[in-house]
Image (cartoon, grey):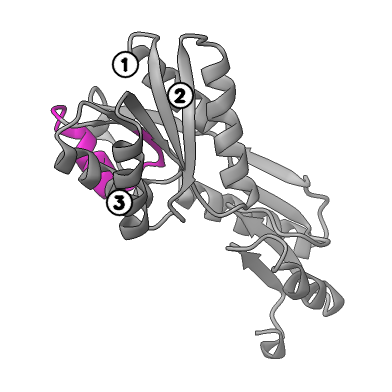
Amino acid sequence: MLQKKIDILLINPADSVGAETAVLAAKKAGVVVVAIDAQANGPIDSFVGSKNYDADFIAGEHLAKALGDKGNVAILDGIPVVPILERVRGFEDAMKKHPNIKVITKLNGKQERDTSMSVTENMLQSNPTLNGIFSVNDVGSLGALAAIQASGRDVKLVSVDGSPEAVAEIAKGNTPFIATAAQFPRDQLRIGLGIALAKHWGANIPKEIPVDVKLIDKTNAKDFHW
């Protein structure tokens, strides 16, 4: 890519640490580097991403309310990049406000549908008193949903992303999937490109720009889209 003499690199790393080599090479070539959605190690010019901590704090609060402020919950974790770590931290902090809700297990679904379904099946079998699950992303949550529905258990599910399939499920109302904290990827990309161009043209830009999130539940799911 650098051989094409690019001026701007927008990067969305699956591995924050592993992206550092690419960032260093780009900066050495004089390229403006902006990370989108997930942080990248190295001397990036800026980072544009969702308020991931806030996303899962509000998802956690919604789950707590749905459970009547008591019960046992689980975390369906993912890859250890900054956004995922922040989501888990936000959810855990929300749960600390509710002493009658206990996080009894945390397992890694790798943010994949099939893996998350299998992991959730294990969660349900190992934890007969489980009342709720928080998934770090919508893809994983859809796998978790399949496992919950197959079990016939009354287990409520919340997530993050706002993907069309997840929102359509939530809009049904009669589903274990009660909410997702929606991101706005178009806004992230638009803002990221804008500040990258500004930097390229000589302007000073902020090191980080957080993008708001929005809780989507059955009351507003039918009107929401990216």
- As drawn, the residue found furthest toward the bottom would be 3
Q: CA distance from mark 3 to mark 1?
A: 22 Å
Q: Residue at x 73, y 65 (%)?
A: 33
- Tell me, for residue 75, which label it has, or none: none
Residue at 21% across / 46% down in the picture?
146
Asked if disc 1 and disc 2 are in contact, CB closer than 8 Å, the reply is no
Q: Which quadrant of the rendered structure holds the N terminus?
A: bottom right
Nearer the observer, 127 or 177: 127
Residue carrying label 1: 66
Label 3, secondary structure: give it: helix
Which circle marks residue 60 in the picture?
A: 2
Say which element carries label 1.
helix
Local SS, label 2:
helix
- Along the horizontal axis of the image, is 68 left or right of 59? left
Say above or below: 196 vs 57: below
Give, as a single range, the part of the protein colored magenta: 158-174
Q: CA distance from mark 1 to mark 2?
A: 10 Å
Q: Position of residue 42 (x, y in %)?
A: 81, 62
Q: Can the viewer see residue 54?
A: yes
* Rendered location of residue 81, percent (x, y): 62, 52
Amino acid type of the residue that numbered disc 3 sits on in the rendered structure: Met
At horizontal 72% and vertical 63% (from top left) the residue drawn is 17
Give the amino acid at mark 1: Ala
| 21 over 184 or under it: above or below | below
Mark 3 neighbour class, 10 Å CA radius: few under 14, some 14 to 19, many 20 or more: many
- Quarter assignment of residue 45: bottom right
